[in-house]
Amino acid sequence: MRLVVDLNKCQGYAQCAFLAPDVFALHGDESLIYNPRADDDQRERVARAVAACPVQAITADAVDRAAGVREASDDR
Amino acid sequence: MTADYVEWLRREGRIVIVGASLAGRRAAETLRAEGFAGELTLIGDEPYEPYDRPPLSKSVLLGMASPHHTELPHRREIDAKWRLGVAATGLDLTAKRVRLADGDEVEYDRLLIATGVRARPWPKEEEARLDGVCLLRTRDDAADLYRRLKAGPRRVFVIGAGFAGSEVASACREMGLPVTVAERAGAPLVGALGGVVGAVAADLQTENGVDLRTHVTVTALEGDPAGRVRAVHLSDESVVEADVVVVSLGSLRNTEWLDGSGLGAGPRGIACDAGCRAFDFRGIVTDDVFVAGDVARSPHALFGYQFLSLEHWGNAVAQAETAAHNMICHGVDRRPHLWMPAFWSSMFGVNIKSVGVPPMGEEIMITQGSLAERRFVGVYGYQGRIVAAVSFDNTRWLEFYQAQIERGAPFPVEFTTMDRRPENRQPLPAGFPDPSLPTHGPTVTLSGYSPADQQLVFHPARH
Ligand SMILES: Cc1cc2nc3c(=O)[nH]c(=O)nc-3n(C[C@H](O)[C@H](O)[C@H](O)COP(=O)(O)OP(=O)(O)OC[C@H]3O[C@@H](n4cnc5c(N)ncnc54)[C@H](O)[C@@H]3O)c2cc1C
Ligand code: SF4
């Protein structure tokens, strides 16, 4: 699944890194780095990170939507 | 424009977006989210669906993400016709048509231009073609550079110490690779953040083992008989052996395809009003052509109505949303794009963020922390008010400073803050280089009108 973090918003609270450590990591004291294409088995964890981010900085496919089950199809 | 036209446009009009990247994708999503039901076409010269660039110089080079996997998440379905891998080559404003490299033409009722910028190449073409001379703008560039770094070159040479060049140098050090950085100015990041903060960036580099050379320019790249780069010659007559050279000299705006179209487009970008409507070369606003992202330059009330060109991720998103909104609504419902400039970068484990327009600042005050600890907030002042703030590992405070900028708070700052040190009571000259001297290129450009943009001949009106 695809995801992107708006690092202008991100405050480095590391909630996401706590909930999905394979996808998000702090690099130094404050810088967040992440894998923008998380493995599918991380879906649940990423969904929780999206929900937990105090500044709503994470956008991910589909999980923003209510069900959180279906990945947005490639609408090319 | 009649109300009927807008209703018709929303229902069955044709909208074409040229430039299928961050601004293009987000604009398309906004159009659909706001009820545009007509035909939507996205034209992009890269063969890929829109992807995100900031990770290319960060997680990708650090091996945390694949360069081929930074596609942007979809906020919603956009039901668009995609013309990927084909460049727009011309625009006919009267006939409302975009010409494509494959000979096709696409008609529009409204057009959004989001063609962004490209990396400025090494100016000597033959040297630029040497194997091992790299740029970093696209995902192909990132894949190529990552592969070369992984192969363990003896030394990497970075030309230009702006954000991108400094991030590359940081990644090299993390991979344990010897790296030399050359910068024409006196320190890294001076074009964007000035000399006071630049000095901190210089210490960061040297302490992390970067061989930093300032006040020098690269005069030549030398190849071996097989056509691979092997050495870099500098203006101080030194020669550095390197097998990977990263050219990081700022960017060029993708406006050449508009030459002769009559739009106010040129090397500084495409001028538009605060509603994202493009100007034609006479300075008259068009009503069918909109602009967003790195290629746009628009006036900002908070910064003296100067035209701002911002090569910032957040600006591309916000401007795309505003442009898309304005494209399909009535005049009175239009919104201005008065986004507060903001960007981030990270290098050598330090989180750098800024709000406002630092290069506008004449003076700087360190209002929190200290330069020596590399954990601080610096506030920039221009003509008695705060115009920008930068933080090194102090991101949580920026929101506060943003509010100060928004209300034009006075400079020098008088408020007391947490963690304010006695030595920081006085403003210092911010140390921006003379703008007429080229550096690696700042990511914010303040510019007024330039007749050179359109090779326009000015004839005063005769009465
Ligand atoms: C390595 C790197 C790191 C970055 N890091 C940061 C960061 O940390 N923080 C930050 O704020 N910003 C960062 N940026 C800047 C950010 O990525 C840009 O501001 C953003 O990509 C702008 O989006 P855009 O859609 O306006 O333009 P672009 O992303 O440049 O997209 C324009 C698209 O249009 C295409 N195009 C051009 N001409 C034509 C034509 N004639 N026909 C068809 N298509 C055309 C281009 O190929 C491109 O795909 C970084 C950029 C790079 C390259
Ligand atoms: S949870 Fe949100 S604010 Fe915190 S580090 Fe992650 S993205 Fe940033």
Image (tube, rainbow, N blue to C red):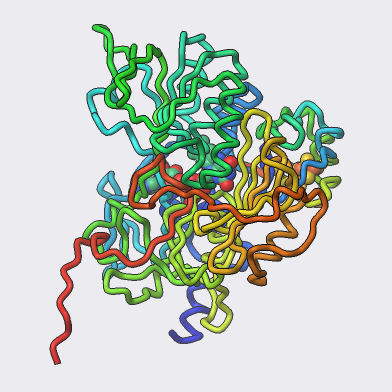
Which residue does the image show at 41% across and 39% down from the upper left?
B440
Viewer-closest of B55 and B349: B349
Q: Would residue B96 be found to the left or right of residue B145 on screen?
A: left
Q: Looking at the image, which is closer to me, B298 or B237?
A: B237
Quarter containing the C terminus of chain B: bottom left
Which one is in front, B77 or B448?
A: B448
Quadrant for the N terminus of chain B, please.
bottom left
Residue B425 visible in this rendered orientation of the protein? yes
Q: Is residue B236 above or below residue B324?
A: above
Q: Is residue B44 left or right of residue B192?
A: left
Q: Is residue B307 left or right of residue B92?
A: right
Q: Which residue is at 59% across, 30% downward?
A: B203
Image quadrant in which you'd find residue B272: bottom left
Residue at 68%, 30% in the rendered image? B349
In the displayed structure, B451 sits above or below B426; it is below
Q: Quadrant of residue B282?
A: bottom left
Nearer-the-camera pick, A1 or B171:
B171
Asked if B287 appears above or below B431 in the picture, the reply is: below
Identity of the residue furthest to the bottom in this view: B463
Q: Position of residue B306 (x, y in %)?
A: 45, 67
Give percent across and percent down for residue A44. Answer: 84, 35
Q: Position of residue B426 (x, y in %)?
A: 65, 55
Report x, y in % for residue B99. 28, 54
Q: Is residue B78 visible?
A: no
Q: How many marks?
A: 0
